[in-house]
Structure formats: structure tokens, C-alpha cells
Image (cartoon, grey):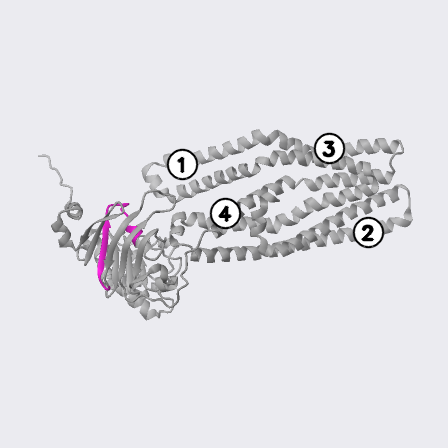
């Protein structure tokens, strides 16, 4: 029980119902054992031709069978209803907890790992609560009641059965000593297989074009081989012991032992016929009730692993919420003062002593090479993570002194890969403002230069987008996200690589959409395309987590530093073309 402490802690909200289900299962086990006792007396009455008691014993069996069946069904009813309640409670609790976690934690761990906890791990606990807990009670209650009944009939037979039980369970416990570690390896191996299959299927277009599956399929093959190695290792370590324990705890060998001993004692008048019959029925019944024990323990171990993952997620520290009330930004300015930040688990600073100010209703662009820290700057503004050093201010107020809803109510975002929901186009745009009218939605779409393309669709704004809007191009999805941000209409706008998906055809429309979006806003734009930020009021050049240059386009060109080199490279790339060579 010690090793399953986390499991029982996680299911504690339904523990009373589970205890009731286990009690009902125990009552069912008692009824079954009592049924076997009545059967022993019935057989003895038939053998001795005692017709007076046959009907009573038969009625006793009928009642015990009815009660046993009823309590068994009732136990599973209670446990299943409790399991459904647990599933709902856990999913709500996890969802609420995710809502207050730093957004950086969500992005770091990815949707796959969090989805696994929210779906698979919660479902595993549902299965444990619904199906395993009544069996868990039965596995312990049935042998106890059986032993009591055996002691009632003949203590010697009871001691033999108890010895067989202790030997079998001791061997099984020894075998399962390392089961937790093996189960963890087993689950990791299975997850690796699932991940490689998903990757292979999702990357099918790339796979077919480039390597025909040779490289990517090899990951799946490697995962399968590793999984086979885990299973083989377990079998070599525990195979013989598992077979021996199952042999000892099997009803047939126990029946043979009890039959030999009981027959010998019966022929020597050391046990009655009733004692012999009850011995065979109860002894083999006790061993049969132990058969699910190993499977049940494996289910419990897997459930414990799921419970620990849920517990770890729920114990992640939420975003620290300020206790200060009624603090509001004075304006839409943004200030970074000596900001340094290091990602969890890393030694090197992602940002080192960053200082710059964005005045209200001005346009500041942040550029630099990949991995320089540009996106980190953008994502610290809404507190994806909390900084270790320095201060970030909005409207002269430390963002850590602002309530989360106040902070986010001053910000709009368009990220590199804006998420599009599996819903209608209108509802996707209304994510920026759920109370917006249809006219406001259309106006936002027009400003984002996406209205005409929406109206060209058969259902227009009622068109249902596929998962992640795969029926839309990257540029179209970006313009949908821009429409959402326009509808949100907040004083500060953060654009993180928002032009990365634009092609030549989309670029002009995106620029017009950005112009409408950025009107009268304080804007921070992270960009590689220098043409889009040439007219920025301020350009901040970042390199290896530090600001190395700052100024407008012309100021930075005059410096003839990093930005100048980037601008020249950008111009050369734009003017680059392949010259055809003609042979005479």
C-alpha cells in the first residue's frame, strides 16, 4: 500500500464511494463463501440421504447466490459512477491548474505531454477506480472469509491452505519487487512507439518526398526493438518465478494436494465426509480468487505511474499572483530595466541585462539572428515566465504587481503559429471578443484583408475549419489571427514572427492588415524580414541575449554595424536570381 500512496491520494475525492464499493464487494465475497458452505452441507445431506435439510440448504444457496450477485453488481455500479465523477473532477482540476500555470511551462512541455496527462492518465485512473477497486477488495476479502470457514470445518486443512497461500504470495511478492521499475520502462517504451508512429504519420508528405520512410521508419523500428528488449529482460528475470507462483496459486495443484490429504484422512476416519467436501470446495475457491492478483497488481502499478504524473503536474507552482489591488497601468508604454532571464534547467542566460523603452503608440521592432533571444523578450511581457533579475513595466507599473487579467487585458498577440480552432471562421475571429456582433467580425476581417477570401467560400463565415485550419494557407491563417487581434482591440500589440508564413502574394495583404492592426497601438514586432520593420520608430538588435544596437533604420545604417550587415544581406537575398546560361 505504501507504494500506491499517490494513487490513493489522487482518488481521495471519491474515496468514500470507493470504500463503499469495496465494502459491497466484500459482502458479495462473503455471500459466495457462505454459498460454498451451504453447498458442502447440501452434498453431505445428499450423501447421507438427509432429506429433511436438503430444501433448507438449497434455499440457503439460492439466497446466497442472489445476494452475492446483487452486491457484486451494486459494487461495480458504485465504483463506475465514482470513476466517472473522478474523471470529471480531475479533468476540471487539471484544466483549472493549467490556466494559472506560467504560459512558458505550457510551451516548454508541449501539447502532447499535457494531453497525455489530461486524457490517458486520467482514463487510466478511471479504469482503476471503476474496475479494479471491487476486485481489489475481493482479492483480499475472499481468502480471509474462506480461511475462517476452513478453520470452522477443520483447522488442519485451513493451515495447509494458509501455508500454500503464504508460499505463493511470498514468491509473487519477491518477483514483483522490481515491477515498478519494469513498469516504468514498459510505459516509456510504449510511449516511444506511440510517438514514433504519430511522427511518421504526421510527417508522411515529407517522408515520401525525401527518404521514402527509410530514416523516419527506422525510429519506429528502433522503438519496437527497445520495447522487445524490455519485455525480454523482464521475462528472463521473472519468467520462471512467475510460472512457479502461478503454479502454486493455481486451483488445480491445490485441489490435488487437498484431495490426496483429505482422502487419506477420510479413509482413516480422521475427517468427516462434510469436512472433505468443504475442504475441496473452499480450498480451491480460495486459490481461484487469488488468480487475478498479479494482473491486478500490474494495473495498480500502471495507475500509480499515471497518478504520479498527474500529481507532478498539479504540484507545479502556478504563476505568482499579486495581492495588490486596483493597480492599473498609467499608459501603454513598455519598459525593460536590467532584465536577465535563464530558462529552467539551463546555465546560460537567455537574456542578459536588457534595457529599452517603448513609448505609447510607437512601433518598436526587435531583430537579430536565430536564437538571439527575440521571442523570449516578447513572451516575457505577458509573463510566460517570471524574470530572475530586473523589472518589466507596462504603463510605469511592474507587471508582477498587476493582476493577471489586468495585464492580459492590455495586450493582444499574433504569434508565428497562431492556433486556429476546429470551429467556424466567425467563431475563430470572435475568440478576440466573444461579445462582438457579426458586423464587427466582418469589419475586423476586412481590416485584416481576409474578408474577400472568406466570402468566396460556399458557407462564408459559417465555413467550418478543419483541425488546425489545414484547409487554409499559412498567410490566410495569419490574417485570421490578425482579424482576431483587431477585434480584441487592446492598447499594446505583440507580433512574434507574424510575417514568417507570408509569401510574395500574401505579403502585400499582410502589410495592409498590419497597418490597420497597428493603428494607435504600442507595437513590439519580432521580425526577420527587415523590409517590414524599416519604418519602425525604434529597432532593437539582439545578439546572444544582449542588446548590441538600438535606434531607427537610418541611425543603425549610419553605425555600419550588425544591422547594416543584416540589411545588406537581406537586400542581396531579395535581389538574388538564377541566371540562365545559354550554350551557343
Left-right relation of 187 to 74:
left
Residue assigned mark 4: 309
Residue assigned mark 2: 60
Circles 3 and 1: CB distance less than 8 Å? no
- Front position in the image: 225 or 162: 162
Residue 403 in percent (x, y) is at 38, 63
In this rendering, the label closer to the viewer, 3 or 1: 3
Task: Give the image quarter of residue 179.
Answer: top right
Q: Quadrant of the C terminus?
A: top left
Residue 126 in percent (x, y) is at 57, 51
Residue 372, magenta (yes or no): yes
The mark found on residue 217 in the picture is 1
Indicate the secondary structure of the residue bearing disc 4.
helix
Residue at image x 72%, y 39%?
A: 287
Q: CA distance from mark 4 to mark 2?
A: 49 Å
Sequence-earlier tag: 3 or 1: 1
Indicate the secondary structure of the residue bearing disc 2.
helix
Sequence-earlier tag: 4 or 1: 1
Q: CA distance from mark 4 to mark 1?
A: 29 Å
Residue assigned mark 3: 253
Left-right relation of 321 to 163:
left
Amino acid at each position: 500500500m505504501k507504494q500506491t500512496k499517490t494513487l490513493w491520494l489522487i482518488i481521495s475525492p471519491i474515496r468514500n464511494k470507493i470504500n463503499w464499493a469495496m465494502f459491497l464487494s466484500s459482502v458479495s465475497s462473503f455471500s459466495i463463501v457462505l454459498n460454498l458452505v451451504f453447498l458442502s452441507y447440501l452434498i453431505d445431506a445428499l450423501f447421507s440421504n438427509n432429506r429433511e435439510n436438503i430444501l433448507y440448504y438449497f434455499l440457503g444457496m439460492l439466497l446466497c447466490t442472489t445476494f452475492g450477485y446483487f452486491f457484486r453488481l451494486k459494487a461495480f455500479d458504485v465504483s463506475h459512477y465514482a470513476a466517472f465523477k473522478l474523471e470529471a473532477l480531475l479533468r476540471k482540476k487539471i484544466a483549472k491548474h493549467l490556466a494559472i500555470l506560467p504560459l512558458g511551462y505550457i510551451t516548454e512541455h508541449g501539447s502532447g505531454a499535457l494531453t497525455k496527462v489530461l486524457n490517458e492518465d486520467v482514463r487510466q485512473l478511471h479504469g482503476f477506480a471503476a474496475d479494479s477497486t471491487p476486485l481489489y477488495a475481493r482479492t483480499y476479502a475472499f481468502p480471509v472469509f474462506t480461511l475462517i470457514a476452513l478453520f470452522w470445518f477443520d483447522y488442519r486443512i485451513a493451515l495447509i491452505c494458509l501455508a500454500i497461500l503464504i508460499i505463493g504470495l511470498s514468491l509473487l511478492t519477491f518477483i514483483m519487487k522490481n515491477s515498478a521499475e519494469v513498469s516504468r520502462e514498459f510505459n516509456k517504451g510504449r510511449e516511444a512507439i506511440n510517438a514514433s508512429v504519430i511522427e511518421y504519420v504526421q510527417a508522411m508528405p515529407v517522408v515520401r518526398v525525401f527518404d521514402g520512410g527509410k530514416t523516419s521508419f527506422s525510429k519506429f523500428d528502433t522503438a519496437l526493438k527497445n520495447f522487445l528488449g524490455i519485455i525480454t529482460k523482464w521475462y528472463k528475470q521473472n519468467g520462471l518465478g512467475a510460472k512457479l507462483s502461478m503454479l502454486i496459486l493455481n486451483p488445480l495443484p491445490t485441489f490435488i494436494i487437498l484431495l490426496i490429504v483429505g482422502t487419506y484422512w477420510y479413509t482413516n476416519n480422521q475427517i468427516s465426509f462434510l469436512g472433505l467436501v468443504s475442504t475441496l470446495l473452499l480450498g480451491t475457491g480460495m486459490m481461484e480468487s487469488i488468480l487475478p492478483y498479479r494482473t491486478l497488481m500490474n494495473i495498480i502499478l500502471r495507475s500509480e505511474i499515471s497518478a504520479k504524473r498527474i500529481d507532478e503536474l498539479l504540484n507545479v507552482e502556478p504563476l505568482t499572483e499579486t495581492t495588490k489591488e486596483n493597480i492599473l497601468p498609467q499608459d501603454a508604454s513598455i519598459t525593460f530595466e536590467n532584465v536577465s532571464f535563464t530558462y529552467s534547467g539551463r546555465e546560460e542566460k537567455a537574456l542578459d541585462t536588457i534595457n529599452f523603452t517603448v513609448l505609447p503608440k510607437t512601433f518598436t521592432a526587435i531583430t537579430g539572428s536565430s536564437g538571439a533571444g527575440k521571442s523570449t523578450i516578447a513572451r516575457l511581457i505577458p509573463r510566460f515566465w517570471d524574470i530572475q533579475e530586473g523589472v518589466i513595466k507596462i504603463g510605469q507599473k511592474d507587471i508582477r504587481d498587476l493582476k493577471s487579467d489586468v495585464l492580459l487585458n492590455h495586450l493582444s498577440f499574433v504569434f508565428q503559429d497562431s492556433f486556429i480552432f476546429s470551429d467556424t471562421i466567425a467563431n475563430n475571429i470572435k475568440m478576440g471578443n466573444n461579445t462582438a456582433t457579426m458586423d464587427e467580425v466582418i469589419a475586423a476581417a476586412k481590416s485584416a484583408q481576409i474578408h474577400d477570401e472568406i466570402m468566396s467560400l460556399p458557407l462564408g463565415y459559417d465555413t467550418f475549419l478543419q483541425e488546425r485550419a489545414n484547409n487554409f494557407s499559412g498567410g490566410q491563417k495569419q490574417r485570421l489571427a490578425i482579424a482576431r487581434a483587431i477585434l480584441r482591440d487592446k492598447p499594446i500589440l505583440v507580433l512574434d514572427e507574424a510575417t514568417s508564413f507570408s509569401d510574395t502574394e500574401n505579403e502585400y495583404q499582410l502589410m495592409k492588415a498590419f497597418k490597420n492592426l497597428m493603428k494607435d497601438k504600442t507595437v513590439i514586432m519580432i521580425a526577420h524580414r527587415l523590409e517590414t520593420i524599416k519604418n519602425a520608430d525604434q529597432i532593437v538588435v539582439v545578439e546572444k541575449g544582449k542588446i548590441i544596437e538600438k535606434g531607427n533604420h537610418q541611425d543603425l545604417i549610419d553605425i555600419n554595424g550588425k544591422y547594416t550587415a543584416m540589411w545588406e544581406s537581406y537586400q542581396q537575398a531579395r535581389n538574388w536570381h538564377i541566371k540562365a546560361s545559354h550554350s551557343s
